[in-house]
Amino acid sequence: MKFIDEATIYVQSGAGGNGCISFRREKYVPRGGPDGGNGGAGGSVFLVGSKDLSTLYDLKIRPHYRAAKGQHGKGKKQHGKNGKAVYISVPLGIVVFKGKRLVGEILKDKEKLLVAAGGRGGRGNAHFVSSTNRAPRKAEDGSSGETTNLKIVLKIISDIGIVGLPNAGKSTLLKAITNARPRIGSYPFTTLNPNLGVLKDNKRHVVVADMPGIIEGAHRGKGIGLQFLRHIERTNLLMMVIDISATEPQDQYETLLSEFKNYNPALLKKPRIVVMNKIDLVERRPQLDIEERTFCVSALKGNGVDLLIEYLKNEN
């Protein structure tokens, strides 16, 4: 299934049913009086979080959703049935917009978000009986439902986000610490979609996400990093992977910080560690000007990985 993290859908809630004008007409029951029932409420449209989903692919291929109308009221004070609601399953971490207005977000399994309220059912003439109006000849029409386009953006929820420039060894590191099976190759932009892995221990599971490579200018749309920068906003810890076999590893570090700042300065407030990868390719480790806790590993050979795993389990 394709990884889709943005989709626009059309939703329409049901209109409410009309109230009924009716008078009781039965043999041996003179002056039976008004007995028109109320119309039913229209069905609403809800988004429902599902921990089993990880993409908006289903919404991309099916973008239209309509809830049922409420039934009209009838005589003998029979109220119309409410319209059936529509529940749309979505992955956790979505943010919903109507135009530029934020509607809400879903972060928990089975959490519901109302995105289109059903129309109100109209009242029948039995509702309007009073001491001064014993035979009202009026009823209400049901109100119309809501029709709107929703923009849904997925921001992956993970405990740890692995970030770095293309070909820094992020996917190899993910595989080394979680036994995930990402696609790996020694060329830029190997990772076209976020890859998820789970670091397990006896107490809990730590979700680790390997993000596609970020290059200088990603916050302006350069490369493919922009569309995935949003996913690291929901991580608890950023793991910055630096290829220390490269010519200028310090530049990699500064480029990542610059892209974080230009995309969303709040990212700089997140806890971060730096993982210097590919130590098996250098004879002498370069001295970098880095403030964060640093780990030196070879994701490919496994050197230093156990120490990193132990830290990640204890810190999350």
Image (tube, rainbow, N blue to C red):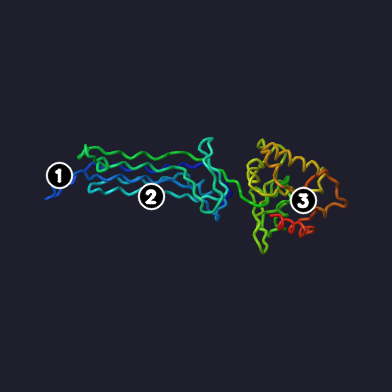
Foreground mark, 1 or 3, reads 1
Judging from the image, what secondary structure is the residue with disc 3 in? strand
> Counting other residues with Cα less than 10 Å from the Cα at mark 3, is it few (<14), some (14-19), or many (20 or more)?
many
- Whether 223 is drawn above or below 274: the answer is above
Q: CA distance from mark 2 to mark 1?
A: 37 Å
> Counting other residues with Cα less than 10 Å from the Cα at mark 1, is it few (<14), some (14-19), or many (20 or more)?
few
Using residue 137 as the reference point, say whether residue 169 is left or right of it.
right
- Whether 248 is drawn above or below 300: the answer is above
In the rendered structure, are the residues bearing label 3 and label 2 in contact, judged by CB atoms less than 8 Å apart? no
**Which mark identifies residue 275?**
3
Give residue 132's position: percent from left, percent from top. 21, 37
In the rendered structure, are the residues bearing label 1 and label 3 in contact, judged by CB atoms less than 8 Å apart? no
**Disc on the earlier residue, 1 or 3:** 1
- The residue at 73%/58% (across/down) is 309
Q: Which residue is mark 1?
A: 31
Residue type at numbered disc 3: Val
Residue type at numbered disc 2: Lys
Foreground mark, 2 or 1, reads 1
Q: Which residue is mark 2?
A: 84
Give residue 20's position: percent from left, percent from top. 25, 42
Using residue 222 as the reference point, say whether residue 284 is left or right of it.
right
> Counting other residues with Cα less than 10 Å from the Cα at mark 2, is it few (<14), some (14-19), or many (20 or more)?
some
- The residue at 67%/40% (across/down) is 266
Q: CA distance from mark 3 to mark 2?
A: 53 Å
Judging from the image, what secondary structure is the residue with disc 1 in? loop
Q: CA distance from mark 1 to mark 3?
A: 87 Å
